[in-house]
């Protein structure tokens, strides 16, 4: 059994002040709890569990049970900007950008909007912002709401031995309930708009291992896996839109909440527009593998068949969005108070997901010991994954041939939207040679690896009209758009619809991996390894807008197919390259010390690191007709990383009261990830529109100098003056992932003491410190040109944590 209690201690940059719970090197319970008995604010972790195992029938049947529970509560700090008390009343007398009267085009008297001009819904939305609590005019609000994480998991296993076979049964269960106080870097940076993220996974497995002949072993396995997960707004069932006077876009009660509000220069408001969503994925698996040993050969061969089912809903943009960009009064917040949005939109949908797919995998592998110092491994694998389909073919897709939306399974369009890939052969080759008294080993390997992707890419089937009807609205001459009717039913201009398409001959992504390493034994207990490892990804999934117009400064810039807005197409066109030098040193246990250290110097380049957005880069091209310009460092590219792990028996009074002490440590140091500098998402400076389904923040600024700074600080992480707004109707020339984010340095240490309390029981005391030196490891800065916090660091990873544990082994 194990119980751990963890509390936050010390201070760490933007994290704010915590508290210490040590007094004279001893614990004081008064420092753990408030007088009311509730835990004090900060970081709290409780972890507990047990494991049991043993025979049911001697030498025949064995069982194993384990359980682990975890309860974590941790404050997450964000800095942002919110309207001042005077501003939300319409008083902009101290504002650097006073608004103008949209009727007269002149400033309001005294830069104060009269009460008769204030829209009640706009004022109500502005009042949802918390009041400033910092003097900083740019980042005037800080909050540290708690993230809560509850997890329970257990495993049960029974093994039974027969005369020539063994039968095994296992059931595993994991249940997690995570509350995220902030939905992400592009969403609200004030409390009350987080996400509840439940997840439950279950796995059942039954296997039989049978010795058919002395040299032939066969294993057959049946398995079932179910993963149910979701993401829901923090406060469900509360209709905030109705409370502030904004009509609902969706009639579904689960979509209640607040439409996503963008007020340029301030924190966004509203719930994440990708939620709510929920899905259940079932995987049925049958595996049969044979192992045959004959002379110098050890061969393995078999088959792995899987059937996949997914039932889900994704209510994307179902609450709608409203943008207040300042185009009407020259002040975004004033636009909100006047109730005059610049752009609104949302989706009316009826697209429940029922995806089905199968995969068939066959493999053969032979490890051939050519001679005592040389082993050759040869293998071949064939993989076929059927393109997923909807059970009832209830989906439409954009068809490039007819330039229209067509139902799947008709008019030559496959049920899945693309054709099956039938040539997925994956060879493998490995060589190991050990000359010179076996103290040196040379290894080399090469292999093909296909991406057995989840069903997520095929969810594109469900995002076309009429099942997913996304519409945009904007003010017209003489017909302004109002906050109390942001999604007008009778919009006077018929708007084109967005669409989604698959590349008809979409292929399975694959990666080629190769490596060469030399391993040298140094003495009896040390090993040094130097390796080169590389890989090349081909036919990786990425998306682009195939209906994007060319940049233009014209007031109206029509798309090539005027009947459609953006047409997002998923393609297998991207590539990646990775090369690295890897050095590894291992000290096996000797004189009380064991250690493993590794250093990697590498570089990864691609033109899209995913087909979904990720932190620091949207993985969507600025210019969909020039995707080669997207080639740059991968979002996850870390040039250098050093990791050291050790375990040491302290030489203190062995065999005495002071004996039995150990210290363990993991030291990690790495350079920062790159990121892409972009214009604010709401700025369409190139006048080429937006890919709504790609969520692509397409436009970038011009770069006119060196973005790097020699004296970086949290207030100015990179040279923001090196970036400029391009002329209207032009793409920016700033490349993808050209600026480095903050690096990471973490020292985690622990101190352990084992004390035997009987012949069969031992008590272990553990004191563990994570981020021992309380270093502030910052997240990526604000990457958006035009934001008041452009170039500033606004959040950081965990501060120092001190954890005490007591484990009883019996």
Image (cartoon, rainbow, N blue to C red):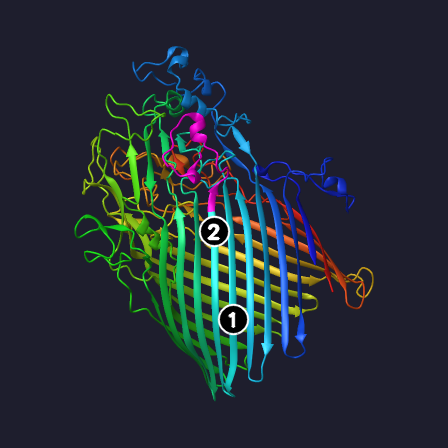
The residue carrying mark 1 is 206
Please say whether residue 606 is visible from this viewpoint.
no
Q: Read off the magenta span.
A: 231-257
| Residue 206 at x, y percent in the picture | 52, 71
Q: Residue at x 55, y 38 (%)?
A: 77
Which residue extends farthest top? 109
Q: Residue at x 62, y 54 (%)?
A: 69
Which residue extends farthest left? 402
| Residue 808 at x, y percent in the picture | 73, 60
The residue carrying mark 2 is 229
**Quadrant housing residue 579:** bottom left
Left or right of 524 in this view: 631:
left
**Quadrant housing residue 524:** bottom right
Q: Residue at x 39, y 13 (%)?
A: 116
**Quadrant housing residue 556:** top left
Residue 573 included in the magenta stretch of the image: no
> Against 794, is 217 above or below?
below
Which residue extends farthest right? 656
Whether tag 2 and tag 1 are in contact, CB under 8 A, the answer is no
- Front residue of 547/19: it is 547
Q: Residue at x 44, y 75 (%)?
A: 288
- Front residue of 406/796: it is 406
Dot placed on the residue nearer the N-terminal end, 2 or 1:
1
Quadrant including the C terminus: bottom right
Q: Secondary structure at mark 2?
A: strand
| Residue 205 at x, y percent in the picture | 51, 68
């Amino acid at each position: 059994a194990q119980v751990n209690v963890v509390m936050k201690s010390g201070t760490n940059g933007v994290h704010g002040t915590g508290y210490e719970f040590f007094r004279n090197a001893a614990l004081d319970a008064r420092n753990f709890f408030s007088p009311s008995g509730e835990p004090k604010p900060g970081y709290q972790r409780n972890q507990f569990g047990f494991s049991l195992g043993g025979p049911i029938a001697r030498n025949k049947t064995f069982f194993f049970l384990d359980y682990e529970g975890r309860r974590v509560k941790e404050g997450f700090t964000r800095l942002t900007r919110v309207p001042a008390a005077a501003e939300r009343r319409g008083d902009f007398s101290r504002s650097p950008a006073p608004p103008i009267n949209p009727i007269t085009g002149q400033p309001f008297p005294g830069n104060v909007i009269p009460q008769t001009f204030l829209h009640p819904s706009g004022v109500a939305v502005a009042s949802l912002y918390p009041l400033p609590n910092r003097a900083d005019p740019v980042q005037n609000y800080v909050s540290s709401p708690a993230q809560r994480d509850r997890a329970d998991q257990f495993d049960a296993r029974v093994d039974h031995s027969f005369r020539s076979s063994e039968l095994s049964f296992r059931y595993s269960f994991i249940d997690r309930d995570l509350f995220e106080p902030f939905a992400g870097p592009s969403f609200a940076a004030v409390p009350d708009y987080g996400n509840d993220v439940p997840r439950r996974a279950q796995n059942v497995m039954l296997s039989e291992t049978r010795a058919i002949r002395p040299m032939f072993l066969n294993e057959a396995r049946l398995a079932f896996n179910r993963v149910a997960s979701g993401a829901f707004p923090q406060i469900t069932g509360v209709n905030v839109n109705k409370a502030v006077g904004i009509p609902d876009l969706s009639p579904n009660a689960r979509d209640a909440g607040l439409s996503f509000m963008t007020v340029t220069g301030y924190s966004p408001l509203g719930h994440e527009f990708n939620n709510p969503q929920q899905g259940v994925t079932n995987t049925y698996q049958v595996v049969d593998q044979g192992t045959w040993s004959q002379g110098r050969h050890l061969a393995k061969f078999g088959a792995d068949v899987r059937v996949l089912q997914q039932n889900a809903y994704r209510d994307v943009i179902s609450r709608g969005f409203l943008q207040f960009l300042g185009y009407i009064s020259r002040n975004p917040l004033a636009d909100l108070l006047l109730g005059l949005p610049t752009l609104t939109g949302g989706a009316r949908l009826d697209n429940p997901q029922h995806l089905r797919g199968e995969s068939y995998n066959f493999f053969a592998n032979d490890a051939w010991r050519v001679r005592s110092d040389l082993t050759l491994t040869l293998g071949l694998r064939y993989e076929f994954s059927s393109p997923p389909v909807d059970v009832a073919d209830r989906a439409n897709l954009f068809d490039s041939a007819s330039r229209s939306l067509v139902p799947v399974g008709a008019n030559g369009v496959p049920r899945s939207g693309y054709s099956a890939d039938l040539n997925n052969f994956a060879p493998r080759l490995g060589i190991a040679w050990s000359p010179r008294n076996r103290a040196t080993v040379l290894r080399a390997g090469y292999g093909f690896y296909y991406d057995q992707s989840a069903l997520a890419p095929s969810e594109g089937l469900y995002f076309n009209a009429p099942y997913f009807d996304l519409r945009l609205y904007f003010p017209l001459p003489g017909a302004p758009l109002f906050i109390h009717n942001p999604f007008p039913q009778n919009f006077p201009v018929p708007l084109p619809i967005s669409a989604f398409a698959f590349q008809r001959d979409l292929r399975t992504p694959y990666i080629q991996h190769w490596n060469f390493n030399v391993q040298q034994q140094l003495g009896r207990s040390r090993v040094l390894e130097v390796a080169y490892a590389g890989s090349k990804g081909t036919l990786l999934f990425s998306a682009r807008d195939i209906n994007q117009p060319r940049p233009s400064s014209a007031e109206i810039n029509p798309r090539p197919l005027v009947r459609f807005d953006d047409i997002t197409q998923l393609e297998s066109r991207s590539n990646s390259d990775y090369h690295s030098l890897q050095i590894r040193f291992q000290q096996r246990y000797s004189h009380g010390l064991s250690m493993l250290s590794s250093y990697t110097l590498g570089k990864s380049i691609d033109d899209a690191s995913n087909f979904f957005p990720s932190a620091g880069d949207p993985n969507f091209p600025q210019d969909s007709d020039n995707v080669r310009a997207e080639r740059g460092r991968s979002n996850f590219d870390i040039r250098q990383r050093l990791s050291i792990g050790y375990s040491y028996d302290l030489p203190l009074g062995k065999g005495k009261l002071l004996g039995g002490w150990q210290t363990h440590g993991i030291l990690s140091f790495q350079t920062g990830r790159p990121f892409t500098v972009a214009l604010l998402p709401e700025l369409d400076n190139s006048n080429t529109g937006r890919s709504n389904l790609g969520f692509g923040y397409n436009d970038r600024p011009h770069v006119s100098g060196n973005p790097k700074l020699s004296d970086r600080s949290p207030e100015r992480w990179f040279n923001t003056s090196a970036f400029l707004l391009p002329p209207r109707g032009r793409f920016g020339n700033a490349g993808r992932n050209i600026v480095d984010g903050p690096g990471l340095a973490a020292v985690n240490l622990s101190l352990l003491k084992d004390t035997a309390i009987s012949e069969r029981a031992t008590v272990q005391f553990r004191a563990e410190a994570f981020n021992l030196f309380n270093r502030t490891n910052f997240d990526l800065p604000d990457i958006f040109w035009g934001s008041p916090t452009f170039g500033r660091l606004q959040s950081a990873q965990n501060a120092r944590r001190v954890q005490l544990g007591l484990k009883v082994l019996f």
